[in-house]
Amino acid sequence: MESAGFNEALALLRPAAAEGALQALAKDPADAEPYAQAALAYASTDVPGMTLLWSLTYQAMGGGISDAAVAAAVAKVLTERIVAKPDEHQQVAFNIRLAPGQMPTRQEADGSLHAPLAHAFEGMFSPAITGFRPPWTVEQFYDVLSTWTGLVATHGTPLDAQVPLDGWLVAVAKSGHLEAFCYQLLGPAFPGELKAYMAGNAKPLKAYREFLKANPLRPRHAPTPDELVRIK
């Protein structure tokens, strides 16, 4: 049984302008650059959560010629789609828009409930954002990603089997390199913060790059926004 408008909701997750990027990604999921191009293609769509997933994956695979463009795309999504506003009592209200509309679902005969990966990611990643206080910085993103990685490591999420990035992030965090990873990903979009970090963290950055050289993410499957994830 499907929720109302299920097929229409799935269609919204594959904008026509981004179809070429999705096809390139499916053709060669072991190459980093298609993840970068898919991330860039989705940054201005109503499915920008995929920009976060694909950008993280791109950098986990070693990054490349699109580092600066990907960093700018991630910064755009964070700034425009994850907004936190404190009220007069300093209580923070969040407006998180990483996937369009309500989550469409399909219930199978065995009672299991499935949803598109893009919506599942928005719902599961959002609690990791509650510690964020504006404005966005690399350190703020590091705090959010640390919370997400801790959740994956401690409890796991329904995304993990289809998003190999999650397990890789746990390994990076356990090795002490998650902060350096965040600067490698987002630093070009925050040059002042990156410069200050590099001035005092040459050894951690070198250690992370050595770790990445020995342990790059090599996915066999590229997550797509409309693939279904079992959420219950």
Image (tube, rainbow, N blue to C red):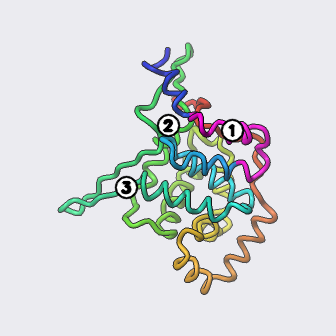
Q: Amino acid at mark 3?
A: Val
Q: Amino acid at mark 2?
A: His
Where is residue 72? Give x, y as percent. Answer: 56, 62
Q: Is residue 202 above or below residue 80?
A: below
Disc 2 and disc 1 in contact, CB within 8 angstroms? no
The disc label shown at residue 83, or none:
3
Spot the residue most to the right.
214
Q: Residue at x 62, y 40 (%)?
A: 18
Which sits earlier in the primary sequence, circle 2 or circle 1?
Answer: 1
* Residue located beneath label 1 in the image: 20
| Closer to viewer: mark 2 or mark 3 | 3
**What is the secondary structure assignment of the residue under circle 3?**
strand
Q: CA distance from mark 2 to mark 3?
A: 18 Å
- Is residue 38 rendered to the left or right of residue 109? right
Would residue 124 be counted in the magenta stretch?
no
Q: Residues within 10 Å of mark 3 (few under 14, many from 20)?
A: many
Spot the residue most to the bottom.
199
Where is residue 172? Give x, y as percent. Answer: 67, 62
* Residue located beneath label 2 in the image: 119
Which SS type dominates the magenta stretch? helix
The residue lying toward the viewer, choosing from 108 and 213, is: 213
Which sits earlier in the primary sequence, circle 3 or circle 1?
Answer: 1
Q: Is residue 98 above or below residue 215?
A: above
**What is the secondary structure assignment of the residue under circle 1?**
helix
Disc 3 and disc 1 in contact, CB within 8 angstroms? no
Where is residue 178? Give x, y as percent. Answer: 61, 66
Instruction: Count numbered badges in the picture.
Output: 3
Range shown magenta: 14-34
Q: Amino acid at mark 1?
A: Gly
